Each structure stands twice: as C-alpha cells, then as structure tokens.
Image (cartoon, grey):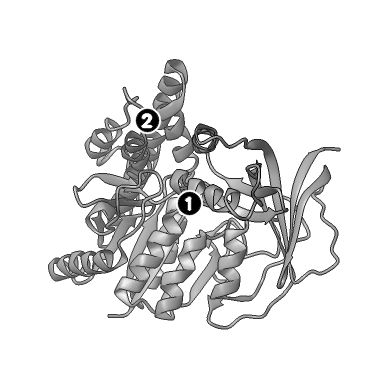
Amino acid sequence: MNWEVHKFGGASLAEAKGFPRLHSILAKRQQQSSVLLVVSAVGKTTNALEQVWSGTQDQASQAREALVHTHLNLNRELLQGKSEPGLVELLQGIQIPENPSDQAYDTLVSMGEKCASFLVTEYLKQQGLPAVLLPAEQAIRTDSCWRSANVDRQATARQIATEVARIKAENPNALIVTQGFLGANQAGQTTTLGREGSDYSAALFAQALGAKAMYIWKDVPGVMDGDPRIWPEAKKIESLSYDDATDMAYYGASVIHPKTMLPLKEAGIPLFVNSYDAPERTGTRISSEGFPQPARMLKLRQTLLELPAQPGFFAVEKALPTLIEHCRREQCLINLLQHTADSVFACLEASETRLQALELGLRAEGWRPSLHGGLSLLTHRDAPGLEPEIPGQRVRVRMVQSLGRDQRFLLDSSPI
C-alpha cells in the first residue's frame, strides 16, 4: 500500500485557523496515497498539564480551567459544538493528581494528545474526509520507564500492522489519525516517550507501514542552519543526511526529535520538513544523502557536574565509571564528558528532580560532587574558527571540546 505519514505539531493547531490548513494539505495527499496523521497536543497544552501535575492547588486549578476552556472553545468554533459530549468526557480525565508520581504524570499529560486527536478526527470527518482515530496506546508498545519510555520496536511494528489492517478492512479509504508521544506498557498503562517525542512516534508508524515518505509540518521553511529566534540571519538547509540530522537534533536543533531518524534510516524512508504556511514550497529533505554545511545548535538548561577522584586513585579509575552508572540509573543525559587526573567533568541534561537524585546517590556512596546549573551548550558544525557567541548575551566558556566536524562550548551567559 502507498503510505505517507504526516506529523503536525502543537503550534500548527494552537488556533482554530490551523485546522482548515491541515485539512487542505491532507485532502490533496489523500488523493494520491494512504495517509496516517500523527498529532501533538494543541499549543502549550503539555506545559499547562505539567502545571496541573506539579503546581500549587491554585496554580493547578487555574491551569485545568484554562485547558478545559481552550478545548471547548476550539470545539465550538470548529464543530459548532457537535461532538462536545465526547470531548467533555476526555476533559474529565484532566484531574489534579493526589500523588504526583511519574506514572501519574504520563496518565495526565497524555490527555493533551488525546483531546487534540479527537478534535482533529471529528473536524476532518465534518469536512468530508474518512478520518478514523487509532489510539496510540493500541499500537506503540513500551516498557514502564515513566516519562521517557523505551519502545519495543518489534512488538510495536506488529501492533501497528495489526491495527492498521483492521481499520483498513472496515474502511479501505480511511485516513488514520493517531497521537504522538504516547504508548502503553504490557499492562496497558499509558506511557510517554519524552518531551517532543511525537516525531519519533511518526517515524515508528512510517517504518512499520513501509511508507514512501514522512512529512513534518512546522512554522519554519525547513531545518535551518541555526535557530532563527536566536540567529535571525539563519538560512534553510536544502538537504541533510540521516546522520547529520540526528546529530543536529541531538545537540539542539529543535525542529526534529533526535530519535526520529533511526527508524527512517533503517527503512530508507525520506523525511521532509516543510512549512505549513507555504506547503507548495520545498522544505528540507533528509535521506541517505546530504551536503555538509556550517550550522549552529544551542541546548539550554545544562548543568556542569564536577566529581573529584577518591584519594589514591586517578579520576578515570573509579570516579568516571561511577558517574556514568549513576547517570544511567537516574536518566541524566551526558552531553559532554572530560576528565583530568583528579576530577571528572560532565555536562548533564536532566530535570531538577533527577539531578537531585543523582547528587544524593553519589553523596550516599561517599563522593563529593558539585553542580552548577543554568548553562548552555553551543555546537558549531563544519565551522572551524567561529567564535562562541549568543546574540545579546555575555558568555564565559566553562568547557570546550573539538571532535571531528564539531566544536562544542559549555557557556555561562548573562544578558549584556
């Protein structure tokens, strides 16, 4: 079957005007291919749901009321109130958790994608497209690593094939709508794949379906050689290899989730990053071939950890393997790693909760870690000699590393 997978993010559906735009793009694609659509939560819904999960009683209540109001208004504007009972039933799942555990986080935050996919499916049906909703929990199989679940890709491929075949048997012309970012463990409990994980979801569906192409629709012309919000002179990159796109995403090019490329590379499926404001224009093509060119990537909210060696040992002997094991255990991402004879230095990326658990775990074993947060990691690719700078910021270099085509700078910065 001739499949295309399309992913629309939250920004594209933040306002009611985004839904006709989505319909226009998919109606044309539906004439040429079988279409599967992956959607994210609308606008800043996930941020608001996190406020419901972790905020004070007043903050959580206000965030919940705003979410209900936003989604009901979209329903009334798009569907003239039709299908409202189904939406209201979903919105009732947005409740302030008595125990804000990581599992409760996944259950609560998943409501953003569920409400968005409901609205999109009902709107497309109203516009005459044969949309059918496939809950991602019926297709994406994961472990129980709450908030950042690991996908069982073989089981997921089988489930996707089974569920899509069932839908197509009932409705051969179906345009399938599903949620990004979500899955379920073996017990059927809702899991999430980590923030911005919808791109990865779409790639898993594309691989399982043997799609001819995957499309991500954004508010930018394609993948840029720098974040245009930071570097206004940034230009669109016409083509990238899977490997270059993965590296750029991993080190801060926020257009694509870094895990997205692996399933696509394995299956040889090209990825197109296009602008939903100008769908007729060519965006960025990501495939097995690409042309290296200079680029800048920036990751914020980085933490520098220093771990002194134990007396009588070099840092590489015990401190280094200990730090790596504790980071693995607490799911703290190591973006930069260096050591001297007597200390290990690591640039870490993790939530405050996980960083605190990391520090406590190390101290409980007699180590003396020191942490300094609020840093930025700037990567220059194919740009030798370019000085580290962030427009409008005064920067101080805390670590620097050159490796192959890349030069990375861990920066302490403050407004000029």
Residue 282 in view here: no
Residue 323 in view here: yes
Considering depth in this image, is 59 or 389 the residue closer to the camera? 389
Considering depth in this image, is 129 or 363 the residue closer to the camera? 363
Considering depth in this image, is 69 or 404 the residue closer to the camera? 404
**Above or below — where is 133 with respect to 210?**
above
How many labels sit on residues?
2
Residue located at (13% from left, 66% from top):
170
Horizontally, is 360 left or right of 373 in the view?
left
Disc 2, SS: helix
| x then y, percent, for residue 216 | 49, 64
Considering depth in this image, is 127 or 279 the residue closer to the camera? 279
Residue located at (30% from left, 72% from top):
208
Of the image marks 1 and 2, the number of the one nearer the N terminus: 2
Q: Nearer the viewer, mark 1 or mark 2?
A: 1
Which quadrant of the view contains residue 236? bottom right
| x then y, percent, for residue 384 | 82, 69
Disc 1, SS: loop
Location of mark 2 (residue): 68
Q: Residue furthest top?
A: 58
**Above or below — where is 413 with respect to 137?**
above
User: Quick one: label 2, few (<14), some, or many (20+) residues within 10 Å?
Assistant: some
The mark found on residue 4 in the picture is: none
Horizontally, is 380 left or right of 263 in the view?
right
Horizontally, is 297 left or right of 187 in the view?
right
Residue located at (78% from left, 41% from top):
413
Location of mark 1 (residue): 196
Image quarter hosting the N terminus: bottom left
Residue located at (44% from left, 81% from top):
268
Query: Residues under labels 1 and 2: Cα distance?
Result: 22 Å
Q: Amino acid at mark 1?
A: Glu
